[in-house]
Image (cartoon, grey):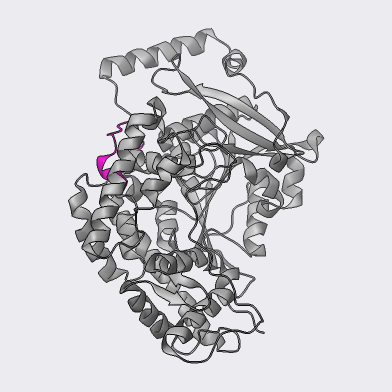
Amino acid sequence: MAVRQSIAARIGAILALVAASAAVPAAAQAARVPAVAWSACTESTLAGFDCATYRVPLDYDKPAGPTTTIALARRPADDQAHKLGTIFVNPGGPGGAGRGLVTAAAGIVRPEVLARFDVVGFDPRGIGASDPLQCFATDEQAEALLSRMRTVPITKAEIAETLAANHEYTEGCKRNAGPLLTHMSTLNVAKDLDRLRQAVGDKALTYIGYSYGTMIGATYVNLFPGKVRAVIIDGNVDPDQRANHRLANKFERAGGFEIALAGFFRECDKAGAANCALAGGSKAKFDRLRERFRQGPVTSPTYGVVTIDDLVGFVSGSMYDVASFPETAQVLQILYSELFGGPSALRTAKAPALPPAPSARGGLPDAYGYTSNDAFYAVNCADAPLPRNPKLYPGFANVFEKASPTFGRAEAFGEVGCANWPVVTERWAGPWNKRTANTVLVVNGTYDPATRYDFGVRMSRELGNARLLTLDGFGHTSSYSACVQDWYTRYLLAGQLPPKGTRCAQDLPPFPAA
């Protein structure tokens, strides 16, 4: 929760607000928030769109104190004469920069929505083109530590080095990042979002948030329940568990990836070898592969040196996109046949690539490229406290791995840097059940790996006024579903909600017939 003031201070603040509201007309109060000053974007990646920066308080408890800037980009509504307002969009993360979403707006909402709304993407505080959070002076300094961290540390030496590097990374953030480090919580991001809403002239918020963006949305609607016009949260966290029981939340996150992978195996075997290269005991094959990689790196004739980190990173990334499933199965079968014999999966002259694990470096051509990685820790460690004794984490990893043999160990060590993070009291931990002016639309897939389906169910129950729309399908956040897009459109334009219990189909099968 936000830092509590003394009762006397709170009463004084309330009385001051009442007096100010009585003395100043509503229009004059709104005018106190400056409008966004848009101009043509100068970056080539945002050519043809509008850009701006906007100043917000660094610390909302000190509104007249230091500020930080938020970078925005806008795709103007096609029919300005009949514009309904602005849709703010957030891609998730935490650490995800949002301005680039305006270039993909046509893939988020349909033309009839784009006609009536400006679409605004924003880089949350500390991220992307906003005033950046920076834990190290150079990329090389960050990379020196990141290279020592294992995604799936197994041996005592790997575990010790991973713990030490995470500790040093956090200490670097504490030394170098400055005052922004302790003001990165989702509580502040939600308050920034309300400033931006006012600054574009909207009386209430229209918002689409994906993945971690659902946490922003859930926080916003509980801070400002009367300012909700239409809020879609897609690929949901469980807000109470994430904020107040983070270790249990991470345990269940690992389980979500296992559920998605089990679904991948079922669909593969059902599709048969003609459509899924790994078919025919696909789970048993993968389990054998994973256990071999746990013993140490493998030199593949096709892919070179492959480690357990590579395997887990590749498979977890593949679970995010159902369109990747056929190629994922082909890569796994190639590795399996190279190690254990059996039919080759090669069906073309060139084997599909085994993509490297996603880089922690952001996509901006900056002198320092690890702002998103730094922000990932800064937000998560502020929002969701974890145990502060790093010696406990190897034990957590063993428990996680027994329940989730592919993804548990990686999830257990994923935020061990929070163990020595500075204590941040400026966070929102609930309540989550404020009754909003309009109903929130909660969208979740049944095989979403990172935000498992029951997180979406819980989100819809924890919020004070929400409706769940279920996508029967795979991938992280909704995709390849005309039915989901239909409801996006009806809800955004007219506030129409799907009937309770509505389920949408996914239009792309996991393994299309050859």
Percent coordinates x, y for residue 426 in the rendering: 34, 31
Q: Quadrant of the N terminus?
A: top left
Q: Is residue 25 depicted above or below 392 in this figure?
A: above
Looking at the image, which is closer to me, 417 or 122? 417
Is 298 covered by the magenta stretch? no
296 or 242, nearer to the observer: 296
Is 162 displayed left or right of 81 in the figure? left
**Residue situated furthest bottom in the rendering:** 342
| Dominant secondary structure, magenta | loop
Relative image position of residue 458 (x, y in whole percent): 39, 55
Quarter of the figure that contains the C terminus? bottom right
Residue 84 picture quarter:
top right
Residue 151 sits in quarter: bottom left
Residue 204: tell me if it is visible: yes
Q: Which residues are magenta?
A: 417-428
Q: Nearer the viewer, residue 502 or 239?
A: 239
Q: On the rendered structure, is 256 left or right of 43?
A: left
Q: What is the count of numbered marks?
A: 0
Q: Residue at x 21, y 49 (%)?
A: 390
